[in-house]
Image: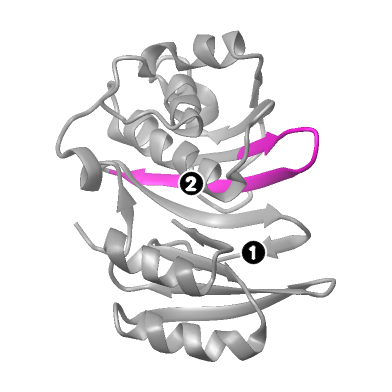
């Protein structure tokens, strides 16, 4: 499997939590990605499904898979099938919406996950492309509208342009950078880096020491 993509199988091996790797295992990874972007207690989860996801999410376990990812459950956790119930028991509002139109990003297994609490909300558009592997096509948060190339791993780092040079030098010691882009929202600047291989935990920690406000997908 290409290191350019994130799969739950990278974490747990060839264990599948439902009848379809695209509709369940990949859905866990989409929920996990949204959780990593939000990185706060969640009070509301709204999931918009498109095309194949809209037609089959109930039968293929996509609902509980995405919610389990948002809750931070390991994909092999026995609680995964009960994730929707558990979320609601925790006071989290959960809504699933079957969209009738085509995917806004051109993939049949598309889910848009919106997470919110009293202070903020984020919106992540993910596609499950097979074998538990996902792409992230759009991320909206804190005034930023990020449109990465899709493939993972991906680093989003909020920092000053002067620090970005040092950050890229450090990042380049760990992995190659396939794509980079800079975004602004008000007075803030965010840098996007698409990587050609996944970072080790120790490498992630070194980067976060340099830039604490970092999202790694």
Q: Residue at x 32, y 68 (%)?
A: 203
Q: Residue furthest front?
A: 209
Q: Which mark is drawn over residue 33?
A: 2
Q: Residue at x 47, y 61 (%)?
A: 150
The answer to whether one can see residue 199 in this image is no
Question: Is residue 121 toward the left or the right of residue 85 in the image?
Answer: right
Name the colouring of the figure: one colour
Q: Residues within 10 Å of mark 1 (few under 14, many from 20)?
A: many
Q: Which sits in the foreground, 182 or 26?
A: 182
Residue 107 magenta-highlighted: no
- Quote the CA–CA distance across marks 2 and 1: 14 Å
Write down the region rendered in magenta.
113-130
Please tell me which of labels 2 and 1 falls first in the chain. Answer: 2
Q: Which mark is drawn over residue 119?
A: none
Secondary structure mostly seen in magenta is: strand
Q: Residue furthest right?
A: 186
In the picture, residue 88 is in which quadrant?
top right
Above or below residue 155? Residue 138 is: above
Where is residue 187 drawn, in percent x and y? 82, 75
Q: Residue at x 54, y 35 (%)?
A: 51
Report the residue marked by disc 1: 146
């Amino acid at each position: 499997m290409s290191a350019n993509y994130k799969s739950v199988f990278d974490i747990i091996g060839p264990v599948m939590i439902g009848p379809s790797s695209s509709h369940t295992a990949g859905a866990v990874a989409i929920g996990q990605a949204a959780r990593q972007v939000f990185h706060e207690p969640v009070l509301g989860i709204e999931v918009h499904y498109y095309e194949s996801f809209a037609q089959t999410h109930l039968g293929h376990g996509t609902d509980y898979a995405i919610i389990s990812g948002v809750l931070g459950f390991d994909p092999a956790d026995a609680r995964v099938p009960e994730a929707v119930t558990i979320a609601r028991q925790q006071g989290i509002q959960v809504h699933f919406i079957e969209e009738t139109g085509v995917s806004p990003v051109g993939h049949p297994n598309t889910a848009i996950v919106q997470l919110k609490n009293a202070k903020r909300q984020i919106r992540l558009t993910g596609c499950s492309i097979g074998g538990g592997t996902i792409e992230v096509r759009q991320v909206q948060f804190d005034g930023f509208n990020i449109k990465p190339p899709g493939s993972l791993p991906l680093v989003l780092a909020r920092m000053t342009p002067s620090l970005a040079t040092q950050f890229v030098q450090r990042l380049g010691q760990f992995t190659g950078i396939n794509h980079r882009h800079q975004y602004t929202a008000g007075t803030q600047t965010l840098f996007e880096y698409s990587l050609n291989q996944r970072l080790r935990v120790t490498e992630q920690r070194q980067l976060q020491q340099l830039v604490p406000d970092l999202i790694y997908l």
